[in-house]
Amino acid sequence: MSTKQLEVQIMGQSYLLGCPEGGEASLLEAVERVDTAMCKIRDAGKVKARDRIAVLAALNLAFDLSDRGTPAVAAAPRAASAIVPRADDNAVLGTLIERLDVALGQDGQLI
């Protein structure tokens, strides 16, 4: 199976990603989910560092998958409408930030 490279944008930054032939649509959907999650965290204004935004977005997406009882490695693609933020996303994000702050201690606080 051959690999194809796609250039994508996440939070305004370009990335060259490899994906198997025929996997382009799934990769682009995943990129859209990650970009949406990261932009939402950035736009909330509480976290500025790109790496911390990425970690929070990854945790938020993983939490969302586990909350639905879907294993991350076997997650079925969702429709684009599923990317629309839910009303409780800010509460979930706030809880994740608080948990990370406690885990990191004073020296590594995210906010």
Image (tube, helix red, strand yellow):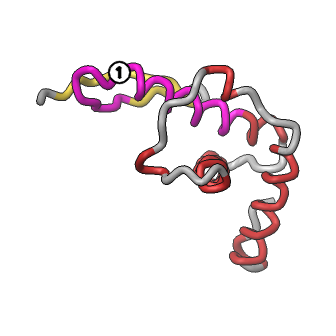
Q: For mark 1, does the 10 Å Cα neighbourhood hold few (<14), some (14 to 19), or many (20 or more) residues?
A: some
Q: Which quadrant holds the C terminus?
A: bottom right
Find residue 107 and report its horizontal and vertical position in percent: 72, 77
Residue extending farthest to the left is 1
Residue closer to the observer: 8 or 60: 60
State the image quarter where residue 108 is shown: bottom right
For residue 68, side relative to residue 4 (left or right):
right
Find residue 97 and report its horizontal and vertical position in percent: 78, 61
Q: Is residue 58 magenta?
A: no
Write down the residue under mark 1: 24
Q: Amino acid at mark 1?
A: Glu
First to last magenta residue range = 16-39
Residue 7 visible in the current orientation: yes
Residue sitting at x 45%, y 23%: 28
Find residue 13 and report its horizontal and vertical position in percent: 53, 29
Q: Which quadrant holds the N terminus?
A: top left
Residue sitting at x 48%, y 42%: 75
Find residue 6 and report its horizontal and vertical position in percent: 33, 22
Q: Is residue 37 above or below residue 8?
A: below
Q: Magenta stretch: dominant SS? A: helix
Could you say whether the residue bearing mark 1 is in a helix, strand or loop?
A: helix
